[in-house]
Image (cartoon, rainbow, N blue to C red):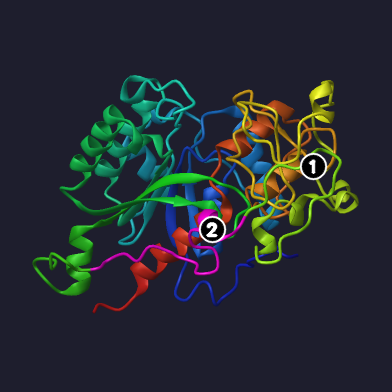
C-alpha cells in the first residue's frame, strides 16, 4: 500500500532512525504528516476537540495502513510534564533526542479573528505550550501560529515575552513562511519558530560556548516557487462561465485548476462528493477569481487559493461550478495526500473547520526536513 502519494516514507528518508516527537494541538494531523514524511515519529499527541480526534485517528490510519490513536484527549492545561513524559515514553528514560511540535489555536491573534491576544482563552494556550517546552526540555521544538502574532503591537510584545522565556535554554529562529512558496496552491502565511537546546548543541559541537554567529538552522527554500506572489504574472478576474486563457509561465502545482477541475476524477476520490448543497444565487453570479469579499470567494482556476479558513463563515466557491468546494478539494488545497480520508460520521462543518485549521502538509514537510538536517548534520 502506498503511504503518501507525493512522498513515500522510505529508508532514504530515515537515514539513521525515526526521531520521536510529541505533538500538541494535533488537530487532524497535517503537521504530523509533514514530519512523518521527513523521518520523524509521533510517539505522543494531544487533541481536545472530539471531532478533530475522530478526524486524526481515521485520517492517519487510512493514510499509513497502521492504527493511529490520539494519546491524550484532555486539555493541555490539565496535563503536567510528568504525565506527558510517562505516557510518551512508557515510563522509560527520556531519549537524548526528541522534539515537540504544535500550533496553539490562533483566533486571538488573527486579524480576522477575536484579536484578544494573550488574554483570550486560545491566546493563553500559547503560554501553556511554552511552559510545557520549558518543563519537558525537548532537544528541539516547533511553534506555529498566524502572522497576526507579529503584525499587531500587543501581540508582538507577547511573542517577545514568550521568546524571552525560551531563550534561557534554547537558541531561537522565527520567520513568516508562505505555503505558496513551497508548491502549495494557497496563499497561506504562518509564523514558524524553531528552537534548539543550547546544552545539546554545545555537546554536539564540543564547545562550552556556541559561537555568536553560528548558523545552526537553515530555513527551507524552493527556488521554483520563492516569492511566487510577485514572481509570476497572475490572471485577474474573469466573468463566471467564460474560460480564461491558461498562463504559460506559472507552475501547474501553484494553480488550483490543476487539482480541482478534473471533476470526474475528484468525484471518485474519498470525500470527493462531500459538500454543502448550494442554495444561493451568488453561486451563479460571482466572477471567477473574485476573492475581494469577506465570504463567497470564487477561486480562479489559474491562480492560487486564498487562505483556507473554512470554519469562520468563510465560503470558497469552485472556479467553474456553482457550488462550494468539497472536502477532498479543500484537503488538496492543503496539500494533504489523497489516501488521507476523513470519516463518514464526522460532521461536515467540523471537517471543513479542521482542514482550515491545519498546516499545509508540503510546508510542514519542508520545515521538518530542515529540522532533520539540523539534528543530523556533522558539526562544522
Q: Is residue 235 left or right of residue 78?
A: right
Q: Secondary structure at mark 2?
A: helix
Q: Position of residue 116 (x, y in %)?
A: 37, 20
Q: Which residues are magenta?
A: 215-233
Name the quadrant containing residue 86.
Answer: top left
Q: Is residue 90 above or below residue 233?
A: above
- Residue 3 seen in the figure: no
Q: Secondary structure at mark 1?
A: loop
Q: Which is more foreground, mark 1 or mark 2?
A: 2
Q: Is residue 26 left or right of residue 288?
A: left
333 inside magenta stretch? no
Q: Which residue is mark 1?
A: 271
Q: Which mark is residue 223?
A: none
- Residue 161 seen in the figure: yes
Q: Which residue is mark 2?
A: 228
Q: Nearer the viewer, residue 88 or 269?
A: 269
Q: Which quarter shows the C terminus?
A: bottom left
221 inside magenta stretch? yes
Name the quadrant containing residue 285.
Answer: top right
Amino acid at each position: 500500500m502506498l503511504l503518501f502519494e507525493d512522498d513515500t516514507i522510505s529508508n532514504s528518508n530515515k537515514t539513521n532512525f525515526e526521531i520521536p516527537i510529541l505533538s500538541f494541538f494535533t488537530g487532524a494531523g497535517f503537521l504530523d504528516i509533514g514530519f512523518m514524511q521527513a523521518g520523524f515519529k509521533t510517539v505522543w499527541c494531544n487533541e481536545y476537540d472530539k471531532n478533530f480526534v475522530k478526524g486524526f485517528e481515521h485520517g492517519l490510519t487510512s493514510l499509513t495502513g497502521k492504527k493511529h490513536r490520539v494519546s491524550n484527549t484532555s486539555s493541555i492545561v490539565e496535563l503536567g510534564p510528568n504525565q506527558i513524559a510517562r505516557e510518551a515514553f512508557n515510563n522509560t528514560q527520556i531519549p537524548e533526542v526528541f522534539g515537540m511540535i504544535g500550533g496553539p489555536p490562533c483566533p486571538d491573534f488573527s486579524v480576522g479573528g477575536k484579536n484578544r491576544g494573550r488574554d483570550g482563552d486560545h491566546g493563553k494556550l500559547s503560554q501553556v505550550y511554552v511552559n510545557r517546552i520549558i518543563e519537558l526540555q525537548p532537544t528541539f521544538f516547533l511553534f506555529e501560529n498566524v502572522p497576526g502574532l507579529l503584525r499587531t503591537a500587543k501581540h508582538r510584545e507577547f511573542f517577545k515575552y514568550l521568546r524571552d522565556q525560551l531563550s534561557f535554554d534554547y537558541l531561537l529562529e522565527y520567520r513568516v513562511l508562505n505555503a505558496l512558496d513551497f508548491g502549495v496552491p494557497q496563499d497561506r502565511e504562518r509564523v514558524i519558530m524553531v528552537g534548539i537546546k543550547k546544552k545539546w548543541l554545545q555537546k554536539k559541537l564540543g564547545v562550552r560556548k556556541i559561537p555568536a554567529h553560528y548558523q545552526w538552522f537553515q530555513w527551507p527554500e524552493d527556488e521554483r516557487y520563492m516569492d511566487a506572489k510577485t514572481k509570476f504574472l497572475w490572471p485577474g478576474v474573469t466573468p463566471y462561465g467564460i474560460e480564461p486563457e491558461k498562463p504559460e509561465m506559472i507552475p501547474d502545482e501553484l494553480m488550483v485548476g490543476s487539482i480541482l477541475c478534473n471533476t470526474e476524477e475528484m468525484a471518485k476520490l474519498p470525500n470527493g462528493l462531500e459538500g454543502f448543497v448550494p442554495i444561493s444565487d451568488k453561486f451563479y453570479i460571482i466572477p471567477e477569481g473574485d476573492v475581494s469579499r469577506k465570504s463567497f470567494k470564487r477561486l480562479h482556476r489559474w491562480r492560487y487559493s486564498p487562505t483556507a479558513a473554512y470554519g469562520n463563515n468563510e465560503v470558497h466557491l469552485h472556479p467553474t461550478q456553482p457550488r462550494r468546494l468539497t472536502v477532498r478539494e479543500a484537503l488538496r488545497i492543503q496539500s494533504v495526500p489523497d489516501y488521507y480520508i476523513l470519516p463518514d460520521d464526522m460532521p461536515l462543518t467540523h471537517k471543513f473547520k479542521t482542514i482550515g485549521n491545519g498546516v499545509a502538509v508540503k510546508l510542514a514537510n519542508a520545515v521538518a526536513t530542515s529540522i532533520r538536517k539540523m539534528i543530523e548534520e556533522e558539526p562544522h
